[in-house]
Image (cartoon, rainbow, N blue to C red):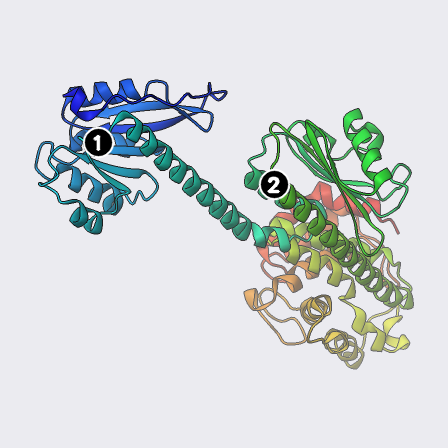
Amino acid sequence: MEDSIFADEPEPSQTQSLSEDFWHILLVDDEEGVHQVTEMVLRDFHFDGRALKISNAYSAKEARALMEQHDDIALAIVDVVMETDDAGLELVRHIRSTQHNHYTRLVLRTGQPGQAPEEEVILAYDIDDYKDKTELTSNKLLTLLYAALRSYRDICILDQHRRSLEQVILASTEIFEANNLSIFASAVLRQICNLLHINGALFYCTSLNEDLEESNNFRVLAASGDMSEYTTKHRSELPEAVKAAFDHALKDKKPFTQKDAYTGYFSTSHGGENLLYVSLEHELNDIDMQLLDIYASNVAVTYENLLLKDEILASQKELAYILGEAVEQRSKETGSHVKRVAHFSYLLALEYGLDQEQADLIKLASPLHDVGKIAIPDRILKKPGKFTEDEWEIMKSHAQQGADLLKSDDNEVLKMGEIIAAQHHEHWQGGGYPKNLKGEDIHIAGRITALADVFDALGCKRCYKEPWPIEDILIEIDKQKGKQFDPRLVELLHKNLDEMLAIRDAFPE
């Protein structure tokens, strides 16, 4: 039996494995002797630094169970005739069609080639090889394993790359819609760790100044692993090995590799200098190095784009404050009111459950809520006493006047400002102006700014009144709950009263 399966041939010498990993092989045959002889021949087999782990099945039923239990079987050598004449063939069909396993290499081995003709079997079944037991000598079995494992390895590598690419694509929304540089860098960081299978710390920083040591613009964008604690640290607090690597890269103006680390250096068209430090647990190949280079280069470009975005947002915020303050000063009121309203609105927006982008927009646009007052005559705007009916109608027109002034087709801040200006005097139960909207027909930004505006205005000195104490303000707002104000927002104001008062203290009259 054994002599008919394996002829005597010298076995090639194998190098000792340096890895604890293994290649998982499944032997499927109803003859015990076949298992014993196969295991004897493969006892010292090594490939690509790994030994074998052999599992045994003595029927197609056992093999199905093992295939379902293990997702790391690289090769299954399957007998054709076992509990039935076509048990092996049906097992192959089950593995490919039912279990949808297209990774495990499948080799049919038969002692009755006439039972299942080779050409018919290869055409009809998704197998990788077909062997007659009498032709499968020990050397040919080893050759078979080398070829099958090499194929399995390459398929797995391709699949890993495919999965890594899928991860990058799936994460692209998170990465490229990030409105914060740290969020962006951290998102890319996670993906590059997955892509390169890096378990060590990976760290990225940047400076917009040639003198990295002295630059106030130096930032650690993202860090992981052992370096996570350095995310908010200054350069002087970084590990000595990292600082030395950065100094070397900055001096030579190019990336370099050490035994246990890779340091990337990348400059941008606007003079920014960017550094990437990767603590290595294993040597990176050329493809890995290229991926790291691409990562750092793209983060560098995106960094500048995000800085530009931050500058634009800062300018828009400043302009909104200036316009809002101009209106407040014209009516002899402090400009701090619009800043407080902006921060109150931002807090309420987040507590209400709006996303970060919407909350930011409301914060930027809410200072413009009364910009329409610029069109109101001084005799009315600064009048200390009660308005006449005609004066009140003119005063109410500031809401629509402001909306008309802020009308824009493409500027998100102005579009939000238009909504807020038009709707911050609408009432939850109706009766507000200019359009007598009710309930959720009023945009959430209008409802939020309405409450923020009144909460602050009641506590401020005006030409027609003294500031109210906080107790009276809360009593009045509770009276208007469900009438003038969205009830849920009133509840959120109470819930976050300490934060609201802290904002008021931060921007005093």
Q: Earlier in the sequence, mark 2 or mark 1?
A: 1
In the image, residue 37 sits, relative to residue 143, either above or below, namely above
Is residue 444 shown to the viewer in this render? yes
Give the structural element (helix, strand or loop) at label 2.
Answer: helix
User: As rendered, which of 78 and 393 lies closer to the eye?
Assistant: 78
Q: Is residue 130 left or right of residue 376?
A: left
Q: Position of residue 443 (x, y in %)?
A: 61, 66
- Residue occupying image coordinates x 75% and y 79%: 393
Marks 1 and 2: in contact by CB < 8 Å?
no
> How many residues crowd around disc 1 within 10 Å: few (fewer than 14), some, or many (20 or more)?
many
Residue bearing the label numbered 1: 63
Residue 288: give its label: 2
Give the structural element (helix, strand or loop) at label 1.
Answer: helix
The mark lying in front, picked from 2 and 1, is 2
Q: Count of labels shown?
A: 2
Is residue 239 shown to the viewer in this render? no
User: As rendered, which of 37 and 220 lies closer to the eye?
Assistant: 37
Q: Position of residue 84 (x, y in %)?
A: 8, 35
- Residue occupying image coordinates x 12% and y 39%: 113
Q: Quote the CA–CA distance across marks 2 and 1.
A: 38 Å
- The quarter of the picture where residue 288 lies is top right
Q: Residue furthest bottom?
A: 390
Q: Is residue 167 left or right of residue 127?
A: right
- Residue occupying image coordinates x 66% and y 49%: 294
Q: Amino acid at mark 2?
A: Asp
User: As rendered, which of 383 and 54 lies closer to the eye?
Assistant: 54
- The quarter of the picture where residue 310 lies is bottom right
